[in-house]
Image: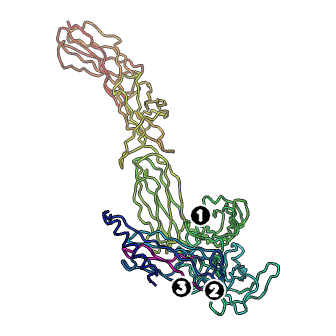
């Protein structure tokens, strides 16, 4: 309510005089002039009290002085147990209060929604004009209520869950005790209210909100020693949703005076302290670990931090580290951790699992039990030996237990060393068995993992197998040796060994490096046979090269045999053809012969072979072709007589050739001269 004060006339006269005195000075309209906003002293029910005393409704009067050039909004800021509740705002319109005016509110400290607590309090206001705050001045007041304050405490009813909870948590109900100063008024009643938890605004913390649950009680006893009155009511919270609430006890008399209320937090929980959830709905494959999530509700009885877990399954108990306990932001959110439960040795069928949660002192915080259903899928993964650049085939077989079907049968790898796309190997959306293969291309050497998994219908997890494998380098080797060598001569075979560890796919680098320390065996197969025999064994050096000296004994092929980088595998080089050349050495030969007469030359040839022959050849010096004469047999000693008859006189060049065989190439003696007379 806005009204001018009795000082308005005199103030106007003073203002006129001041205007005449300062008329020569220019006005600075840009400098805002704020009014003075002050709370007037409250009328006291106790005369001459140092601070005004009120025991019921009173008028809060605010005086505005100094002129209002823009709309001025004023809102009371009053004491209360709640978050700064206020009375409705009032506005002084621009120009309506040129010198001084007053705003009045009727304040009732004993109203139900925001009752004051007894004692000294400040009464203030907030003011704003033209979008800016205006300085205000408050006052003091002492409140002595008609109805004394009321406090409440509660004890949760005992249930299977409540032993694991703190005192602030109830499950199905609680016994509420309210207390206050002794000597209560005969007509006082006590309301016990369950209200929403409230927030950061005054309206969310009011006591006159519709209660979610309430109970009425009366004062029953007085404690002469403590000077307290008390009473009790019972609350049934079984129908309340889980969450956080305010529990309020508020007394009032028949005239509608409400006491300052005692509010305490109350948490409703209907779940066990410890809860377990098993991946796959509790179905776990034989021998595979079960993944269990453990949730521990808050608040809980132990204030110590959560520690390890004690797992009991199939009659065997182990204590395992919990790892890291996680807790999401928010009040009373549960802590959780994930652990694995071994099922090795458990037969197919139901298995009882008990999880005890321990704190860091080793004390038991809470326990819970669930049932695992152990299922045997008879799943197998057949994995080849992986070698870089060699495509391999993985075979996956499984059969679902009775009453179970498979939706996804998958084989994957964990690294890019094995590149492939694996289709769903299940033959259908509700398969009872699977026998499928998938192709893999190893592209880089090193460790990898092949993983098989089965998802049952409904997304329930089946068995998961993780098999560590090794991708081996692709080892290659080449052999080199002289293409021709004289029989009995010493030759050198050279073997070069390389390991390829990366194909260079997907932006990688092709990596081929020497393979040192590899034991290499050189083998020989004689021409006309299929049997390989060992020539010798050597080891590659730091450059991946191995050399072996050998004696030429016949025509045929050489090859190298060595272990591959992959175990139980062998690398065999391509064959290297080699030719052994028979040797022919002069024994006796004439230097002069008669024209037309028969004569012969004797040579020694190696090696001896049954049926080998020799022939003498002759030509004129400077000629390019030879004349070949009749053959001569090679004796077992290697000696051979080569017959000839030359009818033209003059000087001739002669040589003896050993006719080629399967094991030896054609060999020639040196060239000599003979004179025909």
The picture places residue 134, in percent across and down from the top left corner, at: 44, 69
Circle 3: element type: strand
Whole-number angstrom distance, CA of label 1 to CA of label 2: 51 Å
Magenta part mainly helix, strand or loop?
strand
Image color mode: rainbow
Numbered tag placed on residue 106 in the rendering: 3
Residue 447, compared with residue 246, is above or below; it is above
Dot 3 surroundings within 10 Å: few (below 14), some, or many (20 or more)?
A: few
Say which of 46 and 504 sits in front: 46
Across and down, in percent, residue 231 comes to 74, 86
- Magenta-highlighted residues: 57-78
Q: Residue at x 47, y 46 (%)?
A: 446
The residue lying toward the viewer, choosing from 255 and 634, is 255
Mark number, residue 338: 1
Pointer 1 and pointer 3: residues touching (CB < 8 Å)? no
Q: In what quadrant of the picture does the C terminus appear?
A: top left
Element at badge 2?
loop
Snapshot quadrant of residue 641: top left
Mark 1 or mark 3: whose residue is earlier in sequence: 3
Q: Nearer the viewer, residue 379 or 134?
A: 134
Residue 252 picture location, percent across and down: 66, 88
Give the class, few, some or many, for how many residues have Cα within 10 Å of label 1's Cα (few <14, many ≥20): some
Q: Nearer the viewer, residue 525 or 611?
A: 525
> Which label sits in the foreground, 1 or 3?
3
Q: Which residue is mark 2?
A: 258
For image coordinates 68% across by 88% down, the residue present is 190
x and y, in percent, of residue 119 in the image: 66, 76
| 291 sits left or right of 34 in the view | right
Task: Give above or below for 490 relative to 428.
Answer: above
Q: Which mark is residue 322?
A: none
Of the image marks 1 and 2, the number of the one nearer the N terminus: 2
């Amino acid at each position: 309510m806005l009204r001018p004060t009795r000082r308005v006339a005199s103030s106007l006269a003073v203002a006129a005089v001041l205007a005449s005195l300062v008329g020569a000075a220019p006005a600075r309209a840009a400098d805002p002039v704020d009014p003075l906003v002050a709370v007037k002293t409250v009328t006291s029910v106790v005369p001459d009290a140092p601070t005004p005393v009120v025991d019921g409704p009173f008028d809060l009067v605010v005086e505005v002085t100094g002129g209002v050039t823009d709309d001025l909004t004023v809102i009371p800021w009053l004491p209360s147990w709640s978050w700064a509740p206020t009375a409705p705002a009032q506005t002084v319109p621009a120009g309506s209060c040129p010198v001084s005016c007053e705003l009045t509110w009727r304040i009732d400290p004993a109203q139900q929604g925001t009752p004051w607590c007894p004692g000294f309090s400040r009464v203030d206001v907030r003011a704003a004009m033209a979008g800016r705050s205006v300085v205000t001045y408050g006052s003091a007041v002492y409140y002595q209520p008609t109805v004394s304050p009321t406090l409440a405490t509660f004890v949760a009813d005992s249930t299977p869950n409540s032993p694991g909870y703190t005192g602030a948590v109830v499950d199905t109900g609680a016994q509420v005790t309210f207390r206050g100063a002794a000597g209560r008024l005969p007509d006082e009643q006590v309301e016990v209210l369950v209200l929403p938890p409230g927030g950061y605004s005054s309206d969310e913390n009011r006591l006159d909100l519709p209660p979610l649950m309430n109970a009425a009680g009366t004062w029953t006893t007085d404690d002469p020693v403590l000077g307290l009155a008390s009473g009790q009511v019972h609350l049934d919270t079984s129908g309340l949703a889980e969450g956080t609430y305010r529990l309020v006890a508020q007394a009032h008399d028949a005239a509608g005076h409400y006491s300052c209320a005692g509010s305490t937090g109350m948490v409703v929980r209907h779940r066990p302290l410890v809860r377990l959830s098993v991946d796959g709905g509790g179905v776990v494959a034989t021998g595979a670990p079960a993944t269990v999530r453990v949730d521990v509700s808050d608040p809980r009885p132990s204030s110590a931090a959560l520690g390890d877990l004690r797992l009991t399954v199939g009659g065997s108990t182990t204590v395992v580290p919990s790892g890291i306990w996680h807790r999401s932001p928010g009040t009373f959110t549960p802590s959780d951790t994930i652990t694995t439960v071994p099922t090795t040795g458990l037969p197919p069928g139901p298995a009882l699992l008990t999880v005890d949660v321990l704190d860091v002192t080793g004390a038991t915080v809470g326990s819970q039990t669930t049932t695992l259903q152990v299922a045997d899928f008879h799943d197998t993964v057949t994995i080849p030996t992986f070698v870089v650049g060699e495509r391999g085939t993985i075979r996956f077989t499984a059969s679902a237990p009775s009453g179970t079907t498979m939706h996804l049968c998958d084989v994957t790898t964990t690294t890019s060393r094995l590149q492939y796309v694996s289709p769903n190997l299940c033959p259908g959306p509700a398969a009872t068995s699977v026998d499928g293969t998938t192709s893999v291309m190893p592209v880089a050497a090193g460790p990898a993992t092949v993983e098989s998994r089965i998802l049952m219908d409904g997304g329930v997890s089946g068995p998961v197998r993780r098999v560590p494998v090794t991708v081996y380098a692709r080892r290659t080797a080449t052999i080199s040796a002289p293409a021709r060598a004289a029989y009995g001569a010493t030759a050198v075979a050279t073997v070069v060994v390389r390991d390829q560890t990366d194909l260079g796919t997907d932006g990688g680098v092709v990596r081929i490096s020497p393979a040192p320390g590899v034991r290499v065996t050189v083998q020989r197969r004689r021409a006309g046979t299929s049997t390989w025999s060992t020539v010798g064994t050597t080891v590659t050096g730091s450059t991946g090269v191995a050399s072996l000296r050998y004696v030429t004994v016949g025509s045929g092929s050489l090859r190298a045999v060595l272990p591959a980088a992959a175990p139980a595998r062998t690398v065999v080089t391509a064959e290297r053809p080699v030719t052994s050349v028979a040797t022919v050495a002069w024994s006796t030969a004439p230097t002069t012969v008669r024209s037309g007469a028969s004569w012969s030359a004797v040579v020694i040839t190696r090696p001896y072979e049954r049926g080998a022959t020799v022939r003498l050849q002759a030509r004129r010096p400077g000629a390019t072709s030879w004349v070949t004469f009749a053959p001569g047999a090679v004796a077992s000693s290697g000696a051979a007589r080569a017959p000839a008859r030359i009818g033209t006189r003059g000087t001739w060049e002669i040589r003896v050739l050993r006719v080629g065989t399967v094991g030896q190439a054609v060999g020639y003696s040196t060239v000599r001269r003979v004179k025909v007379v």
